[in-house]
Structures are given as C-alpha cells and as structure tokens.
C-alpha cells in the first residue's frame, strides 16, 4: 500500500471522528481553540491506539491466512465502508453515556468520560483496519501516527466548524469516508489478483 493510499485510508477512518466532532462543535455555542484541540486529541489518540491494537492482532493471524489476506482486507474494508455509508445515510448515532452538563454552554469542554467513550466508539473501525494493515504488510510505525494525526486534524476542523455548519456536513463526510474505504479494499484485492 502506497503512502497516498494510506493517507486516503486515514481520511476515511477520520470521517467518523469528524462527524462526531462536528456534532460536538454544534452543541457548543462558541468552542474555544484549546477545547477544540483537547477534543481532537481524544479522537486522534484513540484512532492511533486502536490501529496499533488491531495491527498486533493481525500480525498474530497473518501466517494462518496469508493465502487469502487480500480477500480478508477487501471484506473488512468493504464491511466498514458499507456500515459508514449506511450510518451516514440513516443518521447513525455515536455512543451516548447520558446528558452532558457542558453541552451548549459557551466555551465549556465536554465531560472527559463522554469524550473517551465517543472517541473509542468512533475508532473501533480503526482496530479492524489495523488488522488489515498487518495482513497487507504496512508499517505500523507509519500507519498509526498518520491515522492518528489525520483524525486529530479532521476532528479539530470538525469542532471549529460544527457550531456553524451543524451535523449535516459530518454525515456527508462519513458517507465519503465509507466510499473511500471500499475503493481502497477493492484496490488491494485487484492489485493482488493482478500480480498473482
């Protein structure tokens, strides 16, 4: 997988976090930059850690399924992409641990527990992608930081734009992210079949 394809994959994965960050920003009257950075740090860290977790699991299974790893990568990425498209079209919801007293209050940060749960909830897909990256031999030292930093950047932008644009933009980003994941899965499959 090329660096460009990995970056597109990172954008696809970051779209979940972007959608949640837009919703977070929409619930805050005037988000402050430091609060937006804190929110983005939750999402970026969770994405990077989940990729690393999935990569560790994928490394353990790689020898057992090496002959069909391209099909596994295609199936996993297509499944995640399809779910993201469905959630984007139907308005899928992020984990909701209950009311947040900071919501809709100017400049007040979201509760840490809520942010952790939301960040982990939106990054579950990254663990599955981490498995896929291990199967196709991508470097974890490149993938985890790139995906985490991309998610951080997208989340930061999402929070800052959220109070102006609302959650509609986030849903469209999730649909585009899902399409990107499916296309990357298809590229991995066709690239392997073409070489074989």
Image: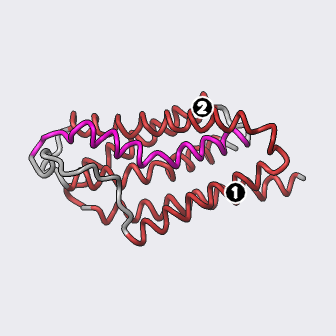
User: Label 2: few (<14), some or many (≥20) within 10 Å?
Assistant: few
Mark 2 or mark 1, whichever is nearer to me: 1
* 116 magenta-colored: yes
Residue at label 2? 142
Q: Residue furthest bottom?
A: 90
In this orientation, which residue lies closer to the viewer: 2 or 135? 135
Give neighbour class at mark 1: few <14, some 14-19, many 20+ (Cα, 10 Å).
Answer: many
As rendered, which of 139 and 122 lies closer to the eye? 122
x, y percentage for residue 29? 12, 51
State the residue position of label 1: 74
**Quarter location, residue 182:** bottom right
Q: For the view shown, which residue lies furthest in the top direction?
A: 141
Circle nearer the N terminus (2, 1): 1
Quadrant placement of the N terminus? top right
Q: Is residue 97 left or right of residue 27?
A: right
- Distance (Cα) linking label 2 and label 1: 21 Å
Does residue 96 appear to the left or right of 69 in the view shown? left
What SS does tag 1 mark? Answer: helix
First to last magenta residue range? 106-135
Magenta segment: does it hold 92?
no
């Amino acid at each position: 997988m090329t660096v460009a394809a990995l970056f597109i994959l990172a954008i696809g994965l970051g779209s979940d976090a972007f959608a949640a960050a837009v919703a977070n920003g929409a619930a805050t009257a005037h988000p402050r930059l430091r609060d937006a950075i804190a929110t983005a740090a939750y999402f970026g860290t969770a994405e990077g850690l989940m990729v690393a977790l999935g990569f560790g699991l994928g490394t353990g299974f790689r020898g057992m399924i090496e002959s069909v790893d391209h099909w596994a990568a295609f199936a996993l990425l297509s499944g995640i992409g399809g779910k993201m498209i469905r959630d984007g079209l139907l308005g899928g919801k992020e984990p909701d641990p209950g009311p947040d007293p900071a919501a809709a209050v100017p400049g007040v940060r979201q509760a840490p527990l809520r942010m952790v749960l939301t960040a982990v909830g939106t990054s579950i897909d990254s663990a599955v992608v981490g498995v896929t990256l291990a199967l196709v031999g991508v470097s974890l030292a490149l993938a985890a930081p790139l995906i985490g930093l991309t998610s951080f950047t997208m989340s930061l932008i999402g929070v800052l734009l959220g109070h102006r644009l609302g959650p509609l933009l986030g849903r469209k980003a999730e649909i585009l992210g899902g399409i990107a994941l499916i296309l990357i899965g298809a590229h991995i499959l066709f690239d392997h079949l073409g070489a074989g």
